[in-house]
Image (cartoon, rainbow, N blue to C red):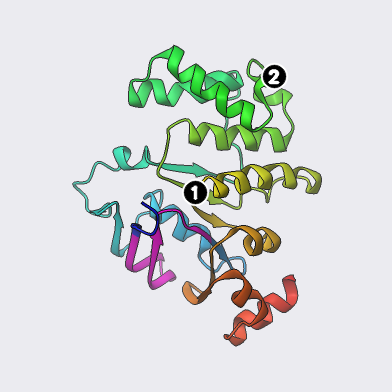
């Protein structure tokens, strides 16, 4: 059901030693949303994303994922992570495994999917991203753009409820960026819920339904893309956009 709250972040704070990286921030992410997080380096974007599946532990606040506060110590976070696909800047594929093996190992081990079913699903996804013919190659034989597309498929093989992207194109050569963004646009059209930390302003403008600006650990401005980019209210955001657009 689109529009239903999937993730509710309430008063989230995060410190690294004496430095406060996230300052009492709150945000709702609804089913079917594509939320793009933008802002200067060091503003807390990646930390926020990593807090959403507790790769970073928040110091205070709540993260309700499908109604469960996953910040509580007694929560089985591994179960919730299975519903949260994560794609990083670096592809993190297992170099000693073929593309296909990279894709099917988690569904088989964590979800008990049989090899035939896991393979069939993985191959259908590889087909969609144009890499079915590379299933038996090793990651080292693929370009950066191809490896990142495989990393996205690997996350999708778990049939997640939300996809988290942490600057998925920042490690790629410019000509490879487009092929990864195309896959992400297709996911958005299929109503996959996505939270995307990105420097790709064109992607945010075209694909997001909400854009959020972080600065110094705070959500400074949030709006629909057209309004966000053409009529920013906050002075810090105006300055930022004047440098990146």
55 vs 226: above or below: above
Q: Position of residue 242 (x, y in %)?
A: 73, 78
Residue labelled with disc 1: 191
Residue 73 in view: yes
Nearer to us of marks 2 and 1 is 1
Q: Is residue 218 magenta?
A: no
Q: Residue at x 69, y 19 (%)?
A: 133
Task: State whether the magenta stretch is mostly helix, strand or loop.
Answer: strand
Give the x, y percent position of residue 30: 40, 59
The circle drawn on residue 86 is none
- Which image quarter is the C terminus in? bottom right
Upstream in sequence: badge 2 or badge 1: 2
Q: Quadrant of residue 197?
A: bottom right
**Residue appearing at x 67%, y 26% in the figure:** 131
Residue numbers of the magenta segment: 8-35
Residue 55 image point, x, y percent = 41, 48
Q: Check if mark 2's residue and mark 1's residue have beta carbons within 8 Å.
A: no
Q: Residue at x 29, y 43 (%)?
A: 77
Tell whether 231 sits left or right of 143.
left
Circle 2 sits on which residue?
Answer: 133
Horizontal and vertical percent position of residue 194: 49, 52
In this rendering, the answer to whether 17 lies above or below 106 is below
Q: Is residue 15 left or right of residue 67?
A: right
As measured in the structure, the alpha-carbon distance from the residue carrying label 2 to the one carrying label 1 is 27 Å
Q: Residue reaching furthest top? A: 116
Q: How crowded is the residue under tag 2: few (<14 C-alpha within 10 Å), some, or many (20+)?
A: few
Foreground pick, 98 / 7 = 7
- Residue 53 higher or lower than 210, as above or below: above
Instruction: Return the residue found at the far right.
Output: 175
């Amino acid at each position: 059901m689109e529009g239903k709250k999937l993730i509710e972040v309430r008063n989230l704070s995060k410190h690294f030693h004496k430095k406060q990286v996230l300052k009492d921030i709150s945000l709702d992410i609804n089913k079917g949303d594509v939320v793009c997080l933008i802002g200067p380096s060091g503003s807390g974007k990646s930390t926020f994303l990593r807090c959403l599946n507790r790769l970073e532990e928040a110091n205070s606040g709540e993260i309700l994922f499908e109604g469960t506060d996953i910040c509580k110590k007694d929560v089985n976070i591994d179960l919730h992570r299975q519903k949260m696909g994560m794609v990083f800047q670096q592809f993190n594929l297992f170099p000693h495994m073929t593309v296909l093996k990279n894709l099917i190992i988690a569904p088989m081990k964590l979800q008990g999917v049989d090899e035939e079913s896991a393979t069939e699903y993985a191959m259908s996804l590889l087909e969609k991203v144009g890499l079915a013919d590379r299933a038996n190659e090793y990651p080292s034989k693929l370009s950066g753009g191809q490896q990142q597309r495989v990393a996205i498929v690997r996350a999708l093989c778990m049939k997640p409820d939300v996809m988290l992207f942490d600057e998925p194109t920042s490690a790629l050569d410019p000509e490879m960026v487009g092929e990864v963004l195309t896959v992400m646009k297709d996911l958005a059209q299929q109503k996959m819920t996505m939270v995307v930390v990105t420097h790709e302003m064109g992607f945010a403008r075209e694909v997001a339904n909400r854009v959020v600006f972080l600065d110094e650990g705070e959500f400074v401005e949030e709006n629909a893309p057209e309004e966000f980019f053409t009529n920013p209210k906050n002075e810090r955001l105006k300055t930022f956009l004047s440098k990146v657009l």
